[in-house]
Image (tube, grey):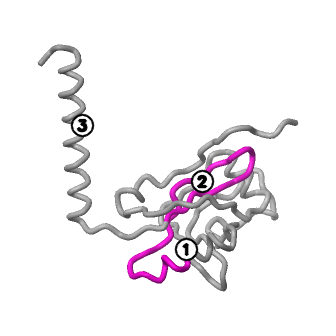
Amino acid sequence: MPREQGRKVVASNRKAYHDYAISDTYEAGLVLTGTEVKSLRAGRASLTDAFGHEHNGEIYLHGFHIPEYTQGTWTNHEPRRVRKLLLHRDEILKMRNKLRDDGVTLVPLQVYFNNGYAKVEIGVAKGKKSYDKRQDLANRDAQKEINRAMGRRAKGMD
């Protein structure tokens, strides 16, 4: 059977870009059991309340919910267990140095299959204040209005 090609997104954390200012992103592999992979392939996962944590020179993902596989038996997995991320040592060192700053955390942005392998895109993030969020919304609305005006002008309606 040929291996899957391309990228298939399983779950994304859309709220992360609203709540955090993402400075860097990294692609990491996940250490998973068989039933977790089968549940992910079925498209069942939730990144809500998930975060990354560094412990003893390794990065772990906490709070990532993969529901139990429906056809699984006694070999099924625990839905919210702590999962290890597979990263290069230099990437872990860069993350550790950035995590020393106050208010900086690791936030999972997407879980996907890349050429058949389960991957997670994790971002180094700093929490936004409420006025930062309002400013982002105002900037987005202003950009939409500019695009509308440019479109009307290009069509000769203005």
Q: Residue 65: x and y, percent? A: 59, 62
Which residue has dot 1 on it?
Answer: 95
Q: Dot 1, how many residues are within 10 Å of its Cα: few (below 14), some (14-19), or many (20+)? A: many
Q: Which residues are magenta?
A: 96-123
The answer to which quarter of the image holds residue 148 is top left
The residue lying at 38 percent from left, 64 percent from top is: 20
The residue lying at 24 percent from left, 62 percent from top is: 132
**Quarter of the C terminus within the rendering:** top left
Report the residue that reaches farthest toward the top: 156
Does 110 lie within the magenta span? yes
Name the element at disc 2: strand
Looking at marks 1 and 2 on the same chain, the residue that comes earlier in the sequence is marked by 1
Mark 3 residue type = Lys
Mark 2 residue type = Val
36 left or right of 133? Answer: right
Q: Residue 99: x and y, percent? A: 49, 78
Which residue has dot 2 on it?
Answer: 111
Instruction: Tell me, for residue 112, which label it has, or none.
Output: none
Image marks 1 and 2: residues in contact by CB distance under 8 Å = no
Report the residue that reaches farthest toward the bottom: 56
Distance from disc 2 to disc 3, alpha carbons, whole Å, reads 29 Å
44 left or right of 103? Answer: right
Instruction: Tell me, for residue 144, which label it has, or none.
Output: 3
Mark 1 residue type = Met
